[in-house]
Image (spheres, grey):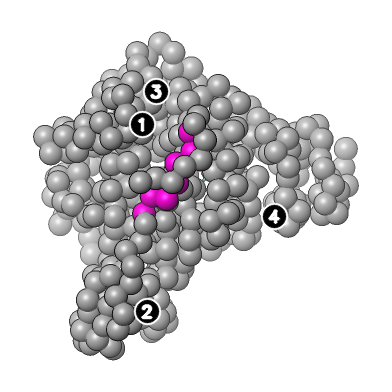
Amino acid sequence: MNPVEIIRKKRDGKKLTKDEISFFINGYLNGKIPDYQMSAFLMAVYFQNMDFEETTYLTEIMLNSGHIIDLSDIPGIKVDKHSTGGVGDKVSLILAPIVAAAGVPVPMISGRGLGHTGGTLDKLESIPGFRTNLSVEEYKKVISEIGLVMIGQTEEIAPADKKIYALRDVTATVESIPLISASIMSKKLAEGIDALVLDVKTGQGAFMKEYEKSLQLAQVLFTIGKNFGKKVIAFITDMNQPLGYAVGNWLEVVESVQCLRGLDVPDLMYITYVLAGAMIMLGGKANSIEKGMKIAQKVVLSGEAYEKFLQLVEKQGGDVSYIENLEKYPLSKHSIEVKSMFDGYVYEIDALEVGMVSLILGAGRTKVDDVIDPKAGIVLRKKVGDKVESGEQLAVFYTDRDDVIKTAKERLAKAFKISHQKPEPLKLVKTIIDDNGVRNWE
Ligand code: URA
């Protein structure tokens, strides 16, 4: 087989065989196929798509590129959650300790920032000392000791996703249903779960901006999960404005810790409770999502979820003193205010643009080997529907980079649309997909 022939075949819209996909993915992993051919292949898939059969082959080949962890000796139904990616989406940091505190084991393999979206791994690694590259043995040890573990793809677990993910991030090949599906499901099927909750984002700040595309993605993810024998619930949730107030790695850890200590950030905590409720139900600790949501709220109020997060940080090598004392973290060289020029209501906050600005501040990558500045990012002061007066702060951003301040200030100010008209409240959780089909979430 010849890589050029395979790229040409996909470029021309033809269906690939399992052997051809396997040749390409494994050739890339073992270094026989270079980055430039993989980039061309990814772009061909981006434009020509893959059907469900090809997507399933791709998932299976990526899954089998590493170990499939067996957690059957750990008691309980193991449940995880994965989001298709958003701006300010720090839900995993809050939800995983909540669900573990509710008695459901959560083994989680996450990704780094991708395109304009943040990644759980980069957020966790902003905690000094926190290790996300545990070996399979360490992974099993941590989950068996505290009922929670959060790592990334490694050379042992989902290595194909680790390598391809980093390349997609910098070649504008993220927004593709087969590539997103295989990336997510190869990680999730490797981690030893029994059940999975999926948060498929839709809107301006999501990879799938149109609802119909998000629904297609949700259905592909759901069906792959079911075909691999897992219990699955998928939600389609809004990503038109950033989730919560903080965007940027350490800033998002701070907001997550505050929420775990009981702060109510309404949009962020509502989504967190719905997803956690579904996980707690799938984990057999509640007989409905609503009852699971109540349990989730209870473990936040009692402090058990925060305690679980501290245990996680400690077990994975992080310095807990930074979590207990958030002010201890170093500050960015610049903190710049963005103010409103008008009176009115915040009508829209362009999440994609906020995500793009966070990248130029240093919170994400534009090249594979870019190093992230964990302190960089944005804290919104206003959200959609809030009243604002001329001269009031809309956001504050943090960066060490001198040369991006002017552009960041202009772009962030433009990302806020101010109107005299108060907008309709955004519907955060739109749809649920489970064994009973596709329904509106009430
Ligand atoms: N999350 C992933 O893990 N992979 C993608 O491709 C997109 C979101």
Q: Nearer the viewer, mark 3 or mark 1?
A: 1
Mark 1 or mark 3, which is nearer the start of the sequence? 3
Quick one: which residue is furthest to the top in this view? 73
**Residue type indicated by callout 3:** Lys
Name the image quarter holding the N terminus. Answer: top right
Mark 3 or mark 2, which is nearer the start of the sequence? 3
Magenta region: 428-434
For numbered disc 3, what is the local secondary structure? loop
Q: Which residue is mark 1?
A: 279
Callout 2 touching callout 4 (CB < 8 Å): no
Asked whether 433 falls inside the magenta stretch, the response is yes
Q: Residue 78: give its label.
A: 3
- The x and y percentages for residue 211 are 53, 56
| Left or right position of 215 against 35 | left
Mark 4 or mark 2, which is nearer the start of the sequence? 4
**Residue type indicated by callout 2:** Lys
Q: Which residue is mark 2?
A: 417
Mark 4 or mark 1, which is nearer the start of the sequence? 4
